[in-house]
Amino acid sequence: MNLDDELRALGRSAVPPPVSPELTAAVLTRVAGVPVRRRLRDRWRALLAGLCVLLAGLALTPPVRATVAEWLRIGGVEARPVGTGPSTAPPVPAVPGQLSLAEAARIAGFTPARPALLGAPSGVSASKGFVAMSWDGVRLEQFQSGVDPMYWKKNYTKLEYVPAVDGYWFSTPHELVLVDQRVVRIAGPTLVWERSGITYRLEVADKARAVQLATGTS
C-alpha cells in the first residue's frame, strides 16, 4: 500500500472528536462577516436593478417619447425627419367638397368626429375610409388606421409630444406625402393623434388652439 492509500484509509477510520458549544460559537463568530458581504453584494444588485427601472421610466417620459416617435408611426401617419424642411408653408387649405356629415359617413364607412367648439364645417369631402373637413384656418382630416400608413410627414425639424391627446405636434412646415411617394403639398403646423382606430390630422397655426380643438373632437 502506498502513502496515498494509507492516508485515505486513515481518514475513513478516524473518528472526529465531539464539537463543544464554545467551538461552535467561535466558528460562528469567525464567519459572521460572510452574510454582511453577501448583503452588500445584494444591495449593489438592487441598486443596478433600480437604475435599470429608472432608465426604463425615463424612456416613457414625453420628451424621450417624442424623440422616439420621430422615427415611428403615429396611427396612419409615419414620421420621417429626413432632409431639409421648407422654411414656410402656405395658408391652411380649405376642403372644396360640400357633403353633409351623414353623406361623408356613408362614403367613408365610419362616423366622422368634429370639434365641439366649431360650428358646421364650410367644406366636407370623403372617400372610403377617409373624411376631410375645414373651417376658416382649420383643416381636420380623419381616416382609418391600417396596416400601412396613409401619409408620410417628411423634412420637419421639431416634434412635440402632447399628453392631452397622446399625440404629436409638428410645429414646423413639412412635406405631406402619400405612401406612393407623391408629394401632396407643403403642410404647416399640425397635430396628429389616434383614437379607436382612427387617425386625426388637425392643421391649424396655433398649438394651444389645436390642443383645445382636439380635446373637444368627438
Image: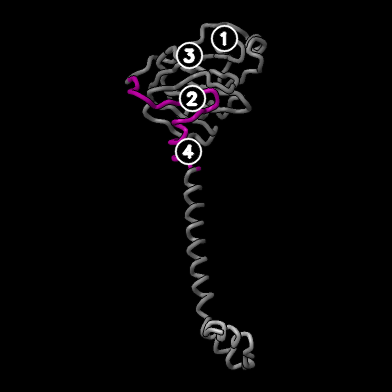
**Quadrant showing the N terminus:** bottom right
* Rendered location of residue 87, percent (x, y): 32, 21
Q: Amino acid at mark 4?
A: Arg
Question: Farthest front residue?
Answer: 1
Q: Label 1 neighbourhood size at 10 Å, few (<14), some (14-19), many (20+)? A: many
Mark 1 vs mark 3: in front:
3
- Residue 77 in sight: yes
Q: Which residues are magenta?
A: 60-86
Residue 4 versus residue 190 in the image, above or below: below
Gap in angstroms between the C-alphas marked 1 and 2 = 23 Å
- Label ID, residue 65: 4
Mark 1 vs mark 2: in front:
2
Q: Nearer the viewer, residue 218 or 192?
A: 192
Gap in angstroms between the C-alphas marked 1 and 3 = 21 Å
Q: Label 2 neighbourhood size at 10 Å, few (<14), some (14-19), many (20+)? A: many
* Rendered location of residue 115, percent (x, y): 57, 22
